[in-house]
Amino acid sequence: MADANLLLEAMLDRAGISHAGLARHLNTSSSDLRLHYDHASVARWIRDGAIPRPPVPDLICQILGARLGQYVTLADIGMTRTGADPPATMSGTIDRATAVWRGDQHARPAGKLLVGTQAAAPVWEWANPPDDHDVARLGERRVDPADITVLRQARHHYQQMYRRVGGAPVRPRIVALLNRRAAPLLRAAYDDSLGRQLFRAVGGLAALAGVCAYDADEQPYAQAHLHTALRLAKASGDRQFGAYIVALLANQALYLDDRRLVVQYTDSALRTAGPGLRPALTLDLHALAGKAYARMGDASLSLPHLRTTESTAARLDRPHEHDEASYVLPGLAETQLAEALRRLGDLPAALTYAEESVHTANATHLRGQVHRFAGLALILAAKGDLDRSIHIGHGMLDRAEGMDSGRIHDRVTTVATQLRPHATDPTVAAFLERADLYLGMKGI
């Protein structure tokens, strides 16, 4: 079965045409064709991504174009054979963004996860010309700067909520806001300057929706939200913000163990953002590249990135960093270094960094603390120090309590798996019982 055609559904919704209405328009469009479509035919095009025989796709473009008063292409209705092609206009960008948001809100399938060149294409588009020279738009209602302030405040609020309780309960709230407030604003009126601010604010929310979908292990939707955010970032003209979103895509690729794609993403972000890239993102991108090479077992390529990660940590200038990069807190560099060095087999060095990351754990939020404690517990277990590993593992579970997060679930699972061969030890058995209870509760 092909992917769902969210674009066609979004265009029909904009035009105010029902499934039965489109079928009726097609059937009466030409007496020579003798078409006999019904609402089920249109539903199948949307649900299964099916493409009717020519000239029906062109007729659909004509019908929608006449209703909307604009030129509609096959790409706009998702009826090209290469659906991953980027939209050529900002109108197309907005249509694709709202299609993703509507699909997520109504729990429709997001389609397959893009891989290879298709996954890299949105990052290539962000990094290369043409740029958006004027994003001004005409409309019945003019966007007010206060609208943008509301979106920025909402992103900050939901980011804090995500860090406390995880992505699963937060994602529906963000997606609802994108549909209810952001989508109408994107189709309102604004000049070039205000439009770029709007794209920046909406992009921030879309990126956070991607983070929450990733955390809930809804990877196709995570990727779709992040690609949407990256296209809005390009329209905003904020290269630093775009680099942040590429770092999120690299983090997802690392989770999916697509190591080469991580390197491709990080190289592109570092090169495109240039020497003006703020230290927080520079640190994160080099850490991601170092971890990818460590997973490949290539110390010669990993270690230079890890050294840059460590040296950049000393240059952090938190008051002047992007708000989205606020996750780069004291001890994050040490957390990343410890994980990479563990992968490379240098347990003594990894232990030193992991202990420092836990020592500074109170400087970060509970979610970050869980990751730090898990990292240290894994290294201690690998070194055979079961007593300390169990003690740190209990600290991890203390902090994970109440979080509905796929990634936290994974971290707890990894620590439990590492310790399970020692289950005959009473203290290990007690920890595993508690960990299994937590993991079982998350599955309810």
Image (tube, rainbow, N blue to C red):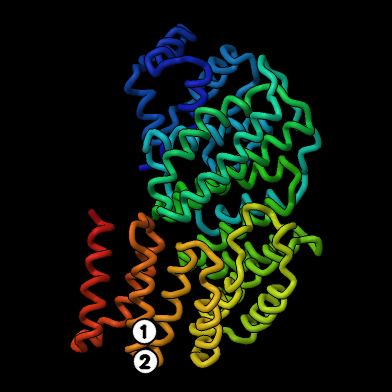
**Among the 4 quarters of the image, the one containing residue 397:** bottom left
Residue at left offset 67%, top offset 78% = 310
Residue at left offset 58%, top offset 74% = 331
**Among the 4 quarters of the image, the one containing residue 301:** bottom right
Amino acid type, mark 2 = Asp
Whether 64 is drawn above or below 288: the answer is: above
Instruction: Check disc 1 and report its element: helix, strand or loop.
Output: helix
- 395 displayed left or right of 102: left
The answer, for residue 356, to whether it is visible in the render is yes
Instruction: Check disc 2 and report its element: helix, strand or loop.
Output: loop
**Disc ID at residue 389:** 1
Q: Which residue is mark 2?
A: 385
* Residue 51 x %, y %: 44, 31
**Among the 4 quarters of the image, the one containing residue 411:** bottom left
Whether 157 is drawn above or below 379: the answer is: above
Task: Give the quarter of the figure containing the N terminus.
Answer: top left
The answer, for residue 297, to whether it is visible in the render is no
Residue at left offset 74%, top offset 64% = 317
* Residue 114 x %, y %: 50, 52
Nearer to the camera, 270 or 63: 270
Amino acid type, mark 1 = Ser
* Residue 72 x %, y %: 61, 23
Q: Are marks 2 and 1 in contact (CB under 8 Å)?
A: yes
* Residue 304 x %, y %: 68, 82
**Disc ID at residue 107:** none
